Image (tube, helix red, strand yellow):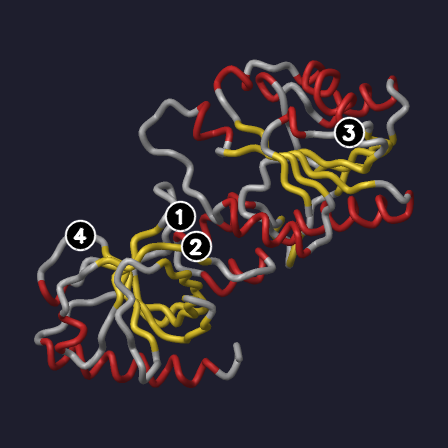
Amino acid sequence: MEIIRNIDEITKVEKSVLTIGSYDGIHRGHHDILTSVVNHAHALSVQSVLVTFEPHPRHILDSSNEKLSIIMDIDQKLEIIESLGIDLIYIIDFTKDFSMTSAKDFLDKIIIPKFQPEYIIVGYDHHFGYKREGSSKFLKEYCFENKIQLEIIEPVSDDGQILSSTHIRQLIKDGYVRRANFELGSVFGFSGTVVQGAGRGKDLDFPTANVVPREKNQLMPKPGVYFIRGRINGLQLYGMCNFGVRPTFNEIELVLEVHFFHDDFVDLYDNEIRVEFLERIRDEKKFPSPDDLKAQLINDKNKCLELEGKYE
């Protein structure tokens, strides 16, 4: 897959099948759109193209201090997009100046001259351009006038629930990570750096790595204990983590502590690690003593080990 971040790097594509979107947390509905793009491109023997934006437009347009939380970073999105077979992705640096571009100018000055789409495929609720004027209605009229075929993909639903990034984000915030993973079609997780902690886990015979997300606006799950999978230096390790304030020790700062079920627990400090949330085990709670906490951690580990076979 070719990745382009500067418009000057784009060699004019002779013909393409193209889609446009932020693809915030690529889910099964997005999979349908991208798969349709790839299939149509193969049928027409042209390139499949995705035009997307980084950072997320709402991070630029939203003036509040509390920015939209990110389900997955750009690296994970690119990995999924490549796995679906897209030939070329153009990542536009979304700025305030760019946000003033009208939908018509965006198509006339970038999409048409650079990619010459024979076919445009978008989701049912897609909007783009200044004040989101690039609606499905606008695209239908524009594509008709410019002799471009248009396909609008209907929403994917499961048991009456339409799959969307908004719904998945709420599932994760509420701790329903297994359901979120089903709707994503991949495992929710993020990359982060291992930093020095208080060392209490080691004293409890459960050495932990404290992980700080790489993405400052990273979406975090509901506090609690989770069965997780970690990836570091090419290794895949299973374990459990606690995300919370460690109330047994009267602390108040939210911390993500990861314990791996691995005999050779090496020094992970300053390494980058990926943490994937497989299932939620329980709420975080305050225990009368460290010994009571340790007894609960043993129970948590046994429960996680029973689940491990589902994911191997």
Q: Earlier in the sequence, mark 1 or mark 4?
A: 1
Distance from disc 2 to disc 1, alpha carbons, whole Å, reads 8 Å
Q: Earlier in the sequence, mark 4 or mark 2?
A: 2
Compared with 307, 157 (above or below) is above
Amino acid at pointer 2? Ile
Q: Which residue is under mark 4?
A: 253
Amino acid at pointer 4? Glu
- Foreground residue, 105 or 64? 105
Distance from disc 1 to disc 3, alpha carbons, whole Å, reads 34 Å
- Dot in front, 2 or 1: 1
Horizontal relation, residue 303 to residue 289: left or right: right
Cβ atoms under marks 2 and 1 closer than 8 Å: yes
Percent from the top left, x then y, of residue 140?
81, 25
Q: Which residue is under mark 3?
A: 115
How crowded pointer 4 is (Cα within 10 Å; few <14, some 14-19, many 20+) is rated as few
Percent from the top left, x then y, of residue 304?
38, 79
Cβ atoms under marks 4 and 3 closer than 8 Å: no
Whether residue 283 is visible, yes or no, is no
